[in-house]
Amino acid sequence: MKQDALRWTPLAAALSAAFACWPLLAAADEPASAPSVVVVSATRAEHTSFDLPASIDVVDAASIRDTQPRVNASEALAAVPGLVARDRQNYAQDLQISSRGFGARSAFGVRGVRLVADGIPATMPDGQGQAATFNLDMAERIEVLRGPFSALYGNHSGGVVQLFTRDPQGAPAIEASFAAGSDGLRKLDVNAGGRSGGIGYLLDASRFETDGYRDHSAATRDQAYAKLVVEPSTSSRLTVTASGLRQDDTQDPLGVTWTSYQTDRRAGEIDTTDPQTPRRSFAERYDTRKSIDHQQAGLAWESRFGPDRLQLTAWGGNRRVIQYQSFSRGFQAPSSHSGGVIDFDRDFYGVDANWRVVRELAGGTVRATLGLEFARSRDARQGFENFVGNTFGLKGNLRRDEQNDVENVDPYVQVQWERGPWVVSGGLRHSRVKFDVRDRFLSNGDDSGGVDYRHTTPLAGVLYKVSPALNVYASAARGFETPTLNESFYSGAGAGFNFGLAPAVGTHLEAGLKAMPIEGLRMNAALFQVRTKDELVVDSSSGGRTSYRNASATLRQGAELSLDAELGAGWSARMALSALHAIYDEGFGAVPRGSRLPGIPKTSFYGEFGWKDAADRFGAALETIANSRVYADDANAATPAPGYGIVNARVQASQQAGGWKLKQFARLNNLFDREYVGSVIVGESNRRYYEAAPGRNWILGVSAQYQF
């Protein structure tokens, strides 16, 4: 009983301030400030976030661009409650992003959270996405949708992170920016844009380089982006985008054991079987690295017919990856082993068409969206030994050769009815995700086959406007999440593709309030619960293969509270607090009931206190980021990564002279040089779970823009 009380203490504390203001809010006749933040992620059309029965936050352009090097989305997402975005200091494996605990088990890339950029999915049909493809240099805002409403985006469970690039405006302009920092960080960006009549354009190119904080973690990333906007009439608009990302031989430092982390946070795990003296780390001996070449293009057509709207979006691209891994079996690898080199060439494409109508019904206004999404990816995937002769880190004999196809076909409908103080929402999406494998490497058996997942996800939500300054809401949905290709490649019985895995199905419940209690203060608060069955967990890991199984039911209960305050005289404050109780609700194997889900902090906090002058020429702020301890394995048996709190400081300045606009910023991150684990690799079979975060580090940036 005492443990239950302690469990809910953070949740009660997170919401106590919100409900204490209830009498003041309910009595307000006029809003303290206009609810002007407009979002599209929850309803697929413009709508003020204050009047939506959903948890949705917006990160604006200033937060993304003004005092950051714009390398990782985690820079901007730290201030979003319920979201944990970890920079792993490992550019070979991308960020770890989890929303309400979904996505924390991903060993690389982003899963469990849907990624979208300018309406085009950055998540593949199997649910795996790559945040590195986001172009932060051109970002106008990032919308983060959590909870039941995200179920209408299909195959994922946790939420939606959607980036919108800026629209070209005004006379032609050219801009160059440069940032440099600790550990050899260098970032150069050049962009140009403008608009004339009904045609606008943006062009951007950048290069990022780092020597890496951890040993064997150097990286070089080249990105390019282009956007063309054509408005042939006042009621139609065509947007064409193209982007590319290239990372050659990005070093992978791998994780380390707890003992190695305590000995030297920067060093890699030493390979005790290494015959060379002194012995090298696994990363150095096997020269672990990844090369990525990603290109994609998309177009979006929108036509308006009075209040109604037709929208068509199409996209396509190619992603090529070659990754050199480490594994201890070396020359004695079993015949089932697919090798230590992954080489795949992926083509992907898709379309999304939707029709939105607005009508008067039963004394209110109804807005309905009917749509269909289709997406497909095809991988030509091979695996090779990672040695030639006695030398590791080279592409050797072929050990795998197959074609993997994944496609989804998802019709959906979403309806919103508004009358007086009531806003009622509902939706339905039927998802079909199909996997097909054609094995061409038959010396170790034929793993060809397929599996077809189908699920219907309903959504219901209601919002009541208690007063102009206070809205309360509740929503519910059933979501589902299929295994990704990488989670399905192997089965624990030693066979190949695991066609027996079932999708995880969850029931999401949420209740919350949105308030503006006094002038300049915004408050959002939410309570939520998610019960999931058939959660995927690691089944076995041997011979270089990691397999998964449906093993357990899980329970997530939590609270989120965010406050944004304009304090006057240029001062401002922001706070985001999250509390999450995430456990296995049923035991399995050696994992007892009540074990905490790994990779998920129980509490997370972001705080910011800043100042800007009235002319926006100077500014400064302090940031605080804190997370509680995190378990690394399902049984909670390994040493958890301890909780931590860090403080960052930043200053900025800008000047205007004729057509020139100059900007400068400086950041000092981890001001007090705290030592902490930045992220964990959940379930790593060799207990190399831990990835160290950097100590005190600095970044300086300058930019110059000229408008003709």
Image (cartoon, rainbow, N blue to C red):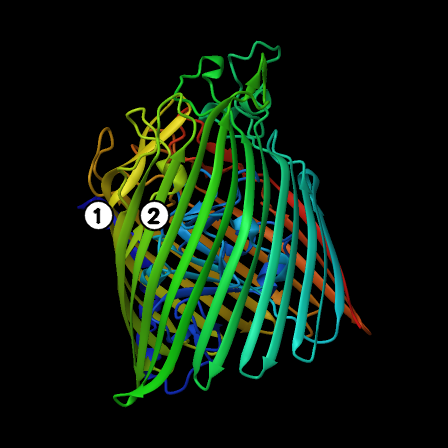
Q: Identify the residue position indicated by label 2 in the image.
A: 434
- Earlier along the polypeptide chain: callout 1 or callout 2? 1
Q: Position of residue 207 (x, y in %)?
A: 69, 48
Q: Position of residue 182 (x, y in %)?
A: 68, 41
Q: Nearer the viewer, residue 405 or 258?
A: 405
- In which quadrant of the rendered view does residue 514 lie? bottom left
Q: Nearer the viewer, residue 207 or 243?
A: 243
Task: Answer yes or no: is residue 332 visible.
Answer: yes
**Which residue is found at the position 46% from the left and 72% from the top?**
311
Q: Position of residue 608 (x, y in %)?
A: 53, 59
Side of 3 where 72 appears, left or right: right
Three-letter code, disc 2: Lys
- In which quadrant of the rendered view does residue 258 lie? top left
**1 and 2 marks in contact (CB < 8 Å):** no
**Which residue is found at the position 52% from the left and 17% from the top?**
271
Side of 430 where 253 appears, left or right: right
The extreme left residue here reads: 1
Three-letter code, disc 1: Asp
> Can you tell which mark lies on residue 4?
1
When the figure is inspected, residue 688 is found, relative to residue 219, above or below; the finding is: above
Mark 2 element type = strand
In which quadrant of the rendered image does the C terminus lie? bottom right
When the figure is inspected, residue 527 is found, relative to residue 548, above or below; the finding is: below
Tag 1: Cα neighbours inside 10 Å, few (<14), some, or many (≥20)? few
Q: CA distance from mark 1 to mark 2?
A: 42 Å
Q: Nearer the viewer, residue 644 or 557?
A: 557
